[in-house]
Image (tube, rainbow, N blue to C red):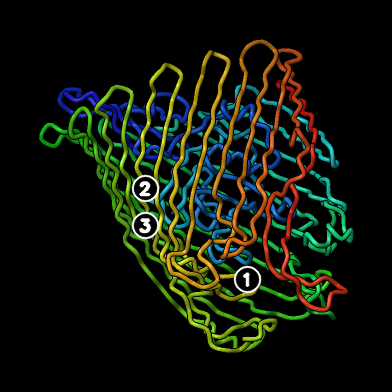
């Protein structure tokens, strides 16, 4: 009888695996947690680049922004080029992922990425996340997973909130830049379950000469019963935010003394957004099968005012407004069961997913001081997405198992356009579908060591407007009013990976991955212009090394190195480098906890230089930042924590771009590096009282 553990399926927010045995001749299931920090991954994982990070591992990570919890994914960088109410910029596996185009995220089963978004395809705004409530995060890289669909070619992360807090608590945070935050959370017993509540009130001005005026009101109610394996939950969430924005600024303005390093060009940039949601999750199991289901409804809006080129229009200026108003309805269900096929233990999974985006308004307007003076385009979009998937896992013998899967994605678009001119030409219906096979082979010929081969097809969707645009709607463009070719709605990706994971010593885990990812085209709808920006096919490849070491009960050390190469695969005289593509990321972390009143954590992150134009003649500078956090328990239920962000006060960039802009007083546009500086050394003090 084979005692080998098998991977089972992703349950919202956690990875579980099966330990398969027999009871009265029938296969049974026993849940075993897969974590990114123990040798348990050897024998149960399906790749070298997946894992789960628990709340305990997040506790001592100093964070500047909520979305930085994603930096637990090895090789991933979270940055910002505008106000902190706007979605972050993400980098992973040779990508500048913009605001989430090829990296997907979900929270309690709800997708966070937004297709056909006013600002950018796959817009991933995690500013509503409350880090203290995160129970665990499960990450995967590459298009190898039948359950993962749109936006997940580079990777995907599933986040789950806690169902139960050990004690309710009140936390007050204060810091430089008029940073202030109040968080109240608890999980009392109600009936047969627990009611998790969290309320966050937040404000911040930051180091900017233009005070950011960031205000955030954020709340969650989650009622859960049973367990993650047999039970369910209902969650209500509400988030509102508004801010003023210091966007990226031209380096020549800083060098010439026109503005300070933390200065601004347009004082009226900024935004406001909200996200309200109702969601539910249900799970169950019997002797040889498990099932899960979820459903959600989301109400979302964004108004964003930006000015990246400043004064090309000498009369009105170059500010524009992007508006997105939508409601989202969706859900999914899957069932997994095990069987004995001629002496081999087998797991089969079938699943379905559906999502309906009802976008009442997605618009681009030309504005001055937030006052509109022209409409580039305004659309109403219905976007329907459906998926089916199947997966089969077989334990062939004690040292070899395989997993094969297939996913089918089906999309339908309906666009009603009302723009500056030629509006009806950009309206219509379109649809597309793709089938994506997946494969994982796992070899474990030696104890505590496994080798992995992963391959699969994936995709990212293009903006529905780009799939139907036939006339250039942008009056600022010399080609305004001329014919343009619609783009393919779904762009194919193809990934391959070789990996190794080993636990040679107790407390030590090592992993390595050699990967390649091809994208058929990087065509993206450019929300800043209302048009589709053409690009060529591309190839990315790289290597990732990770180590996790727990030398003692209270100490943890981890480090990872990610090197990648990104190139267009069709030659062009302008060059074959992909602007913004990340080439090198290194991180190192240490923490000390659960030993007396003291706890602390330290994180170092190196973000390597990147090409900013296709011929690689202009590059960003690398940056290395160190954050540190120390905590002291003043009593059993009171803890004081000091965080120092950018410990060595490095004057580096959070992000760099290279493009043409025109300041007032300049006769013509100037090509220049535009930078958003990393925040200076920042101190924050937190007091948490449990009761």
State which quadrant residue 685 falls in: top right
Separation of disc 1 and disc 3 at Cα?
Answer: 34 Å
Q: Nearer the viewer, mark 3 or mark 2?
A: 3
> Where is residue 367 shown, x and y percent of the image?
78, 74
Give the label on residue 361, or none: 1
Is disc 3 placed on a helix, strand or loop?
A: strand
> Where is residue 167 shown, x and y percent of the image?
64, 22
Disc on the earlier residue, 1 or 2: 2
State which quadrant residue 32 falls in: top left
Q: Is residue 388 toward the left or the right of residue 240 in the image?
A: left
Q: Which residue lies furthest to the left in this view?
A: 342
Is disc 1 placed on a helix, strand or loop?
A: strand
Where the N terminus falls, by quadrant? top left
Quick check: can you spot residue 91? yes
Where the C terminus falls, by quadrant? top right
Q: How many labels does the image show?
A: 3
Disc on the earlier residue, 1 or 3: 1
Residue visible at 59% across and 70% down?
Answer: 526
Marks 3 and 2 close (CB-CB < 8 Å): no
The residue that mark 2 highlights is 145
Quick check: can you spot residue 298? no
Q: In this view, does 145 lie above or below 484?
A: above
> Where is residue 619 shown, x and y percent of the image?
64, 56
Is disc 2 placed on a helix, strand or loop?
A: loop
Q: Which of marks 1 and 2 is in front?
A: 2
Label 2 Cα crowd, 10 Å radius (few <14 / some 14-19 / many 20+): many
Q: In this view, does 672 lie above or below 442?
A: below
Separation of disc 1 and disc 2 at Cα?
Answer: 33 Å
The residue that mark 3 highlights is 494
Q: In this view, does 547 lie above or below 251?
A: above
Give the label on residue 183, or none: none
Q: Nearer the viewer, mark 1 or mark 3?
A: 3
């Amino acid at each position: 009888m084979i005692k080998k553990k098998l991977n089972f399926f992703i349950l919202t927010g956690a990875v579980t695996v099966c330990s398969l045995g027999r009871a009265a001749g029938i296969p049974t299931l026993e849940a075993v947690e897969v974590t990114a920090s123990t040798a348990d991954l050897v024998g149960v994982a399906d790749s070298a680049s997946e894992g789960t990070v628990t709340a305990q591992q997040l506790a001592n990570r100093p964070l500047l922004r909520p979305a930085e919890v994603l930096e637990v994914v090895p090789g991933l960088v979270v940055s910002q080029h505008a106000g902190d109410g706007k979605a972050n910029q993400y980098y992973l596996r040779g990508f500048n992922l913009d605001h989430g185009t090829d990296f997907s995220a979900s929270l309690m089963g709800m997708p966070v990425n937004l297709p056909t978004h006013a600002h950018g395809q796959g817009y991933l705004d995690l500013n509503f996340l409350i880090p203290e409530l995160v129970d665990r995060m499960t990450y995967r890289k590459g298009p190898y997973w039948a359950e993962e669909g749109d936006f997940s070619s580079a990777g995907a992360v599933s986040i789950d909130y806690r169902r139960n807090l050990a004690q309710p608590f009140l936390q007050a945070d204060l810091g430089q830049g008029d940073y202030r935050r109040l968080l109240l959370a608890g999980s009392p017993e109600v009936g047969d379950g627990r009611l998790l509540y969290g309320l966050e009130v937040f404000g911040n001005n930051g180091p900017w000469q233009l005070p950011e005026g960031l205000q955030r009101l954020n709340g969650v109610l989650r009622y859960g019963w049973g367990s993650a394996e047999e039970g369910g939950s209902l969650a209500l969430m509400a988030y509102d935010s508004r801010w003023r924005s210091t966007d990226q600024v031209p380096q020549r303005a800083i060098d010439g003394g026109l503005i300070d390093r933390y200065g601004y060009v347009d004082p009226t940039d900024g935004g406001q957004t909200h996200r309200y949601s109702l969601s539910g999750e249900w799970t169950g199991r019997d002797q040889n099968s498990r099932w899960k289901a979820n459903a959600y409804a989301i109400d979302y809006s964004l108004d964003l005012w930006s000015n990246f080129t400043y004064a090309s229009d000498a009369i009105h200026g170059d500010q524009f407004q992007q508006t997105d108003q939508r409601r989202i309805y969706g859900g999914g269900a899957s069932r997994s069961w095990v069987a004995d096929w001629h002496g081999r233990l087998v797991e089969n999974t079938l699943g379905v997913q559906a999502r309906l985006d009802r976008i009442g308004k997605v618009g681009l307007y030309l504005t001055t001081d937030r006052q509109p003076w022209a409409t580039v385009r305004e659309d109403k979009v219905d976007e329907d997405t459906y998926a089916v998937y199947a997966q089969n896992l077989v334990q062939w013998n004690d040292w070899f198992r395989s997993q094969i899967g297939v996913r089918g994605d089906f999309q339908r678009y309906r666009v009603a356009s009302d723009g500056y001119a030629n509006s009806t030409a950009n309206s219509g219906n379109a649809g597309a579908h793709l089938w994506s096979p997946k494969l994982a082979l796992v070899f474990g010929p030696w104890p505590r060591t496994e080798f992995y081969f992963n391959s699969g097809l994936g995709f990212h969707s293009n903006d529905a407007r780009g799939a139907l645009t036939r006339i250039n709607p942008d009056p600022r463009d010399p080609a305004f009013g001329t014919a343009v070719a619609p783009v393919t709605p779904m762009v194919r990706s193809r990934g391959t990976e070789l990996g190794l994971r080993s636990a040679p010593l107790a407390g030590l885990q090592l992993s390595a991955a050699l990967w390649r990812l091809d994208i058929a085209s990087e065509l993206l709808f450019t929300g800043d212009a209302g048009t589709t920006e053409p690009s060529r096919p591309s190839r990315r490849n790289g290597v990732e090394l990770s180590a996790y070491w727990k030398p003692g009960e209270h100490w943890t050390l981890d480090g990872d190195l990610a090197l990648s190469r990104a190139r267009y695969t069709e030659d062009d005289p302008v060059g074959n480098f992909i602007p913004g593509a990340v080439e090198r990321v290194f991180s190192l972390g240490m923490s000390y906890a659960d030993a007396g009143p003291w706890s602390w954590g330290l994180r170092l992150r190196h973000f390597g230089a990147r090409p900013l134009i296709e011929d690689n003649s202009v590059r960003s500078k690398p940056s290395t930042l160190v954050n540190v956090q120390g905590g002291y328990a003043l009593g059993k239920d009171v803890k004081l924590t000091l965080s120092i962000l950018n410990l060595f006060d490095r004057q580096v960039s959070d992000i760099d771009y290279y493009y043409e802009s025109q300041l007032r007083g300049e006769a013509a546009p100037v090509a220049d590096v535009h930078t958003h500086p990393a925040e200076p050394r920042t101190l924050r003090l937190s007091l948490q009282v449990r009761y």
